[in-house]
Amino acid sequence: MTERSENDDVDRKITIGVCVMEKKVFSAPMGQILERLQAFGEFEIIHFGDRVILEEPVERWPICDCLIAFHSSGYPLEKAEAYAALRKPFLVNELEQQHLLHDRRKVYECLESYGIPVPRYALVNREKPYQDLDYFVEEEDFVEVHGQRFGKPFVEKPIHGDDHRIMIYYPSSAGGGMKELFRKVGNRSSEFHSEVRRVRRESSYIYEEFMPTGGTDVKVYTVGPEYAHAEARKSPVVDGVVMRNPDGKEVRYPVLLTPNEKQMAREVCIAFRQGVCGFDLLRCEGRSYVCDVNGWSFVKNSYKYYDDAACVLRKMFLDAKAPHLSTAIPPILPWKVNEPAQPSEGLTRQGSGIIGSFGQAEELRCVIAIVRHGDRTPKQKVKLKVTEEKLLNIMLKYNGGRPRAETKLKSAVQLQDLLDATRILVPHTSEAEYIEHAEKLRQVKAVLEEGGHFSGIYRKVQLKPLKWVKVAKGDTEEERPIEALMVLKYGGVLTHAGRKQAEELGRYFRNNMYPGEGTGLLRLHSTYRHDLKIYSSDEGRVQMSAAAFAKGLLDLEGQLTPILVSLVSKDSSMLDGLDNASIKMEEAKARLKELITSRAKLVQTNGSSKKPWMIDGAGIPPNASELLPKLVKLTKKVTEQVRLLAKDEDEKLTETTSYDVIPPYDQAKALGKTNIDVDRIAAGLPCGSEGFLLMYARWRKLERDLYNERKERYDITQIPDVYDSCKYDLLHNAHLNIEGLDELFKVAQLLADGVIPNEYGINPKQKLKIGSKIARRLLGKILIDLRNTREEAINVADLKSQCQDTSSIAVVKEHRDHRQKNEDSRRTGEKSKDPDDDEDKEIKYRLDPKYANVRTPERHVRTRLYFTSESHIHSLMNVLRYCNLDGSLKGEASLVCDSALERLLKTKELDYMSYIVLRMFENTEVNLEDPKRYRIEMTFSRGADLSPLEKNDLEASSLHQEHTLPIMGPERLQEVGSYLTLEKMEKMIRPFAMPAEDFPPPTIPQGFSGYFKSTGVLERLGDRNCSMVHATTTTTSHSFFSVSRDSFV
């Protein structure tokens, strides 16, 4: 090379060598960015090309000042390293560190060395396939590596970074199975395999804790350590279907990174010495974790990002090779590309339209729904006292050898032990004096054998020791149990109809509960403007109803197990149990029995005949005592017919095996079905997994428990169970043509309509007391939801007011101040115990308005869905309609209008998929301090309460053929035009709700101490973010700085 003059050196363009495979060079993002760099007029772009890279020696490669080089399939990374060592260009991405990216072990090691949070993980290193390792243990629902246990669901990753077959294994309590994640193939990115339950052993793997992310993944793209852009997409963990826009491109939405995440992006960039770098971020319970680092990655289909990346790369090149030149961005960027508007509507998936319109000044802010589970099989219970040593030994095996301790058996291993013992015992208990005991043991055996395999979500057994003896053991004595009570609970499983109902209701909510722009809720959810949380009780049918509802709500596909694990949180303390109200409920049932059996006159509690819902025992039929003998007679008639069917089946079972007679029924596979089992119906068998033996056991127990002939005593608590069984068999087993079943249903329904509502209180005041005890925690959580929504809306309004002179709203983190509560906290020095108010947990992720074409980027809707059982629906409704009867609220009108109270009296049953919905709206034209700023709308649905005998409803008749009943639409609880303010709602509900300070503090993942120790840091970051809007310097234009305030770390 000849010597250049100093002036020539100043005028010379900086050469940028692009040493990457041609497939990558000609990708749209690379082309867009290189074109922009060239448009500045300061750079000469040199493409090396595949032939040069693969065939020419490095000495003959073009000479350049700056080098863009990164590994891809077939790329000679070592050769590029040799070139860099020879010519010493400025490297955007250093080459030596790129070797790390091919080994996930080294990636995690590097992340940890820089203090970047990663999921909890452990390594299993094998020198050869299928090598047995002493430190690796696999059990049904967990693996253990070097003593570190990972319960299902957990993630299994190959150590090789280029192997993208990642597995997620699900617990048996959620249905079991495995989901395989892989690189996109067409419209799929994952597949669920219900039969796979064992982990891979052919290679080395990383096992890590599964992080529930709410069904959304975040991909972060850095361009240098000072710039980070993030996009959200639907996670492949949920259903594996890639959502695409009309152009066939995957739908992703830009989101704002929190200050913590921006620091993480900077550290990833520095740790791996990769200027342009992509990595995967998991957002879980307010924490963020890096789970993968990909190396060179560009954003697709974002012209704003292309502009930003070109500007940042220009500055990097000039700083490295021409520091004397100004890096200021010209007022008008040199390229003249009109940024095309990205489509705001028209996803190819069907059913995402929005119905309904709202006033221009009124915005939906919150949707709270309390939903009962879908159609289920009848709940069953078998109780028997056991003295057999084999059964007592099982109890001791699983309770740690403690003779007086109760044992619960739910796992497949535990239930298999019990089944093995029961199979041995059943043939040896046929003597006359043990006939009833033998019958119950046969029932236990039949239940445990049901379906061919176990899943703890459907069956559970309790063993409670009753009697003990002292036995000699060496020089001492020890206690041993000699008798125990075995309680087997089964049934209550979500049916194919229940799943179908839940999915349909989810779709209905998606299309009707949210006012929309474009694709409505789906777009709202994907852009992080939808804050969704789904809670469920501990019952399997409730969890699966929640998962099926989520599938319909978010337009997901595939099996329910991955959806359940990804999106549904269990909260049994809030949505399960009647312990707090059991005494009051027993009092109500005693009074109810008196009213039904003694023909006592119904008493008006307030003296007003215009309010029939105020009497004791409202809804009880006047001839209830006459209906009881008829109920018993018809129950016996039905039971006898089922006995004959069971006898025929039993005779066939003695000649062959059960699986030759009854087509095998797999509960796990049934979870994926919304249609009836045609083969079983055609074979004349009961629908679902229940054989005739179990069907007979169900009816025989009802017959025995309903009426004690020796004592001539009715048990009215069995009336709902008789009604439940009747309705189930009329809907699912009508093909069995059981005579008298329809007549029994009519009698049972008359009595159940009186019994069920009155079990939760015989009159309004008692209903209020019982309801407030059962729903106390749920009511407290609802008030927290409404209050937090209000505070968030105030914060958004304040921010909008402060930044109204800027082009868009920039939110790094919305930190709720809860003004009044914080003032109280400052006065008392106490920290809030609000479960939704933890300063780290409640980080709000937001859409980045600069990169996405949406009309209202500041709009944000909170949705809280609570799935529960009949008891909580009744209890919540009773508090809403009778709260004004409390002494502290004298003179206040009911939250529910009289016409709705009358409808509720006539409704009687809140059936499967019944729900209560509270929607909160904000009137943005009303002053912030005005109580009318926030309006509450209350609606409810009776659920699927049509009779299976209904003949006049064409839709119902059609659905009946599919063993399904339609869900009734929502009804108003307020008069049309009435205005219920949030202030009034809080006042009426607060006396019955658990105070926020009584809620336990949020749990923080073990080993994580949090990033910020004080709110002051957050407040300063928020202030800095807003003040940067107004920052101007002589070297940086406002157009470029508007990027930095949202996307720069």
Image (cartoon, rainbow, N blue to C red):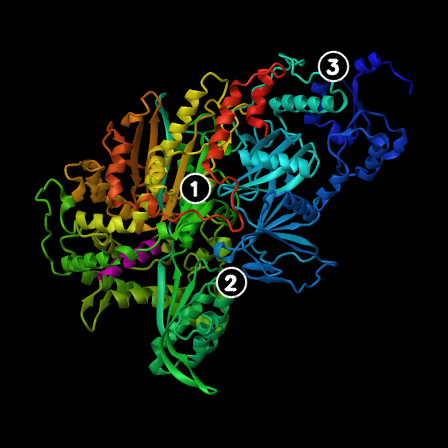
- In the figure, 960 relative to 360: above or below? below
Tag 2: amino acid: His
Residue drawn 39% across the image and 33% down it: 817
Furthest residue toward left: 607
Q: Which of marks 3 and 1 is in front?
A: 1
Residue drawn 28% across the image and 55% down it: 580
Where is the N terminus found, in terms of image quarters?
Answer: top right
Q: Name the residue under label 2.
A: 453
Q: Does the magenta stretch include residue 722?
A: yes
- From the viewer's perspective, tell me whether residue 470 is left or right of residue 947: right
Per the rendered image, the range of residues in magenta is 716-730
Occupied quadrant, residue 331: top right
Residue 363, percent from left and from top: 37, 26
Tag 3: amino acid: Gly
Q: What element carries label 2?
A: loop
Residue 410 is labelled as none
Q: Mark 3 points at which residue?
A: 41
Residue 184, percent from left and from top: 64, 39
Q: Name the residue under label 1.
A: 838
